Image: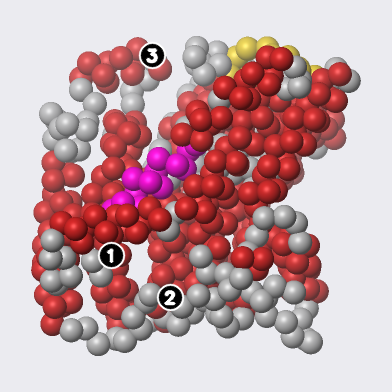
Amino acid sequence: MSSNVKTTEKQGFFAKFLNFVEVAGNKLPHPVAMFFGFFVITIILSGILSQMGVSVSYQEISRSTGGVIQKTTVVQNLLTRSGMRGILSTVVKNFTGHAALGSIVVAMLGVGLAEGTGLMNALIKKLVLSTPKQLVSAIVVFAGVMSNVASDAGYVVLIPLGAVIFASFGRHPLAGIAAAFAGVSGGFSANLLIGTTDPLLGGITTTAAQIVLPGYSVDPTANFFFMFASTFLITIVGAYLTDKIVEPRLGAYTGPKLEVDLNSQMNQNERFGLRVTGVVTVMFICLVLAMVLPDNAILKLTEAEVAKFVADNNRQPGTMELLKPFFGDSIVFILMLSFFIPGLAYGIAAKTVKTHKDVIKSLTSAMASCGQVFVIIFISAQFVYVFTKSNIGIVIAVKLADVMKGFGISGIWAAVGLIFLTAFVNLFIGGASSKWLMLSPVFVPMFVELGLSPEYTQLAYRIGDSTTNIISPLMSYFPIIVGFAAKYAKNEEDMGIGTIIAMMLPYSIMFLIGWTIMFVAWTYLGLPIGPGVSMFL
């Protein structure tokens, strides 16, 4: 039994089931070896299924033209000459192009300096002094939900920070990782603001709806009311699960000693450093706003760029699309600076940075701490490449969609079926937009015929897409979470995919159930899911 698991004679069935999941999962090889095994098995399976002639036909929305196209996808045999050439020639590209790699390297430079100068420790002390202990879980989950408005920033900053925050309160750091991961990924679609995902999915849904409703348009705000309310649901459920199920099951922390000063007394240098940091941070925020808000701002679309967007998409851009250069291309670097600049200011003011060598030492230490994460990224990137290239995931998704259509379910229960179908498909195909490009031409027209609005269908999809992110090894950041968590394992064999899945499974199950119940209740109450948007046509 893993030392991460608290064992008692009075454990209930669910706790015993989670223990079984963890123990069984951790008896598997190290995550690096597992992903290598998946890599090899996928290549072999592609050859077998290709020889069997496995294929699927379906409609999909074209990324280039935006139109609906008829596609037939066959399982690609990777054991051929061209298949093996593709695998061998893309190894470096797969690694360097991994969604998490660049974000982690750049963001950790800023976070590393903030940690090395003592800023993070001082802020944590301040947090301990000013935050009621019973609200910590809710604050971390809520921050995770809100972080998705800034793309993937929550994965690379908030999740490891969650461990440090919990440790500073004398709590288990893995519970902090779980709470943050649940908010960032499990609550991905929920937010109090319109995020980058809203206009992306709205555009795809618009194209799918126009198959049967010419001229129909889905706005980025189509699901806003429901997702606004969902933020509180995810926060409450996530905090409850962290406090009552996840952390008690983890037991007392016996891993490596954490470099967190739990002494609540702050010395004069720390207090002065925080005051200087506060001033510098306000100045930095003003600088960022100056780069985004004015008409001629550096990171704002020009009139020519807006005109091109209107011509290409036949509609005016929403707020998030106007800020796309900021959120899409610059957010990670700006995020890094938001830690680097205050960290440097704190170090100088608190006298923890005396020369430039102290800065370089902190940056180097931050990179050294990511060693295992880089190894996991390398091998998982190769697996994701062969799995995607083989088309096995697409075949699974289309076959399941055909099965669901064959059941002949109607009304709200068809939408509930889509939630659960998406949740299952999400285990095999990552990325919210990639799945919706394939599923929307099937389900949006199908549900229109049932009298359900395209916005309502999109909402059902988003619920299912969010809830199983946290237990899917194919989700691009999942292997990274294993790497973050390994830092807090007493022994290397105590941490594996089984530990993370067992830790996150309660969130996944309860988010899926709770969100579905809210979805059904919202429907029967007849509440609008967005401004001027009904569930029914």
Label for residue 312? 3
Image: magenta residue range:
98-110
State which quadrant residue 386 falls in. Answer: top right
Q: Nearer the viewer, residue 133 or 88?
A: 88
Amino acid type of the residue tagged 1 in the rendering = Gly
Q: Residue at x 49, y 69 (%)?
A: 176
Label for residue 398? none
Q: Is residue 166 left or right of residue 440?
A: left
- Disc 1 vs disc 3: Cβ atoms closer than 8 Å? no
Q: Secondary structure at mark 2?
A: loop
Q: Nearer the viewer, residue 489 or 62?
A: 489
Query: Which residue in the structure is indicated by mark 2?
Result: 258
Dominant secondary structure, magenta? helix
Q: Secondary structure at mark 1?
A: helix
Query: Which residue in the structure is indicated by mark 1?
Result: 116
* Residue 437 percent across, percent down from the top left: 59, 26
- Nearest to the eye among marks 1 and 3: give it: 1
As for residue 107 lying within the magenta part, the answer is: yes
* Residue 9 percent across, percent down from the top left: 79, 87
Marks 1 and 3, how far apart at CA: 47 Å
Q: Is residue 116 left or right of residue 53?
A: left
Q: Residue at x 25, y 70 (%)?
A: 118
* Residue 26 percent across, percent down from the top left: 72, 62
Q: Secondary structure at mark 3?
A: helix
Q: Earlier in the sequence, mark 2 or mark 1?
A: 1
Give above or below for 311 relative to 351.
above
Amino acid type of the residue tagged 2 in the rendering = Leu
Q: Earlier in the sequence, mark 1 or mark 3?
A: 1
Near mark 2 (Cα within 10 A), the count class, few <14, some 14-19 or many ≥20, is: few
